[in-house]
Image (cartoon, rainbow, N blue to C red):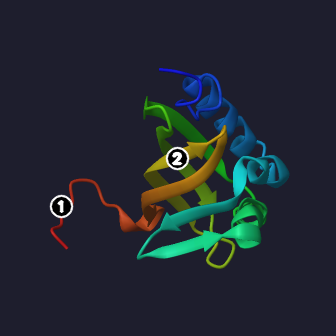
Amino acid sequence: MSSAENHLPGNPVQWVRDLEAVWQAHDGARAAEGYTEDARLVWGANQSQTGAPLRERPRKWFAYASDLKITKEYVAHTNDCIVTTWDSNYTDPETGKKVHERGIEYFRFRNGKVCDQHAWQHSWQDDEVKAGDFSTD
């Protein structure tokens, strides 16, 4: 593959490690630097952000989830896409309850920066999970 066809930022596995370190440090400024000016994030029920609101999102999230603990794992990559998973937990400042999240996301790159990100996750609180419960809801 020629370098003109590869849009990834160097070593994809190291990129995920570096991304995890930025999120573990709650560094909103560094998290925002990784996006192109026209980047788009899509999550949930067709929710999305672009531009300045997208680049402000990490800082706002770190302020909201002030005790956030997160790990990210490399899954796969192509010439313009990296896939990761994550596990995290934080205390909901409105309820005081511990929230757990598990998710998967992909990042598409243009010239070494994220231009498109899609994320899917599951969130639950400690009191919502009972051992042995099974639900089809």
Instruction: Please report contact status of discs 2 and 1: CB closer than 8 Å, yes or no.
Output: no
Q: Is residue 83 above or below residue 127?
A: above
Q: Earlier in the sequence, mark 2 or mark 1?
A: 2
- Give the quarter of the figure containing the C terminus: bottom left
| Nearer-the-camera pick, 6 or 71 | 6
Residue 113: percent from the left, percent from the top? 67, 44
Instruction: Choose mark 2 or mark 1, whichever is in front.
Output: 2
Q: Residue at x 62, y 24 (%)?
A: 14
Q: Quadrant of residue 75?
A: top left
Q: Residue at x 73, y 72 (%)?
A: 53
Please give left or right for residue 55 compared with residue 135 in the image. Answer: right
- Kindly identify which numbered label has been placed on residue 134: 1
Disc 2 is placed on an element classified as strand
Q: Quadrant of residue 110?
A: top right
Question: Which residue carries the number 2 mark?
Answer: 108
Q: Quadrant of residue 121?
A: bottom left
How busy is the neighbourhood of tag 1: few (under 14 within 10 Å), some, or many (20 plus)?
Answer: few
Residue 120: percent from the left, percent from the top? 42, 59
Q: Residue at x 53, y 55 (%)?
A: 117
Disc 1 is placed on an element classified as loop
Residue 6: percent from the left, percent from the top? 55, 30
Q: Mark 1 belongs to which amino acid?
A: Phe
Please give left or right for residue 103 compared with residue 41 in the image. Answer: left
Residue 12: percent from the left, percent from the top? 56, 27
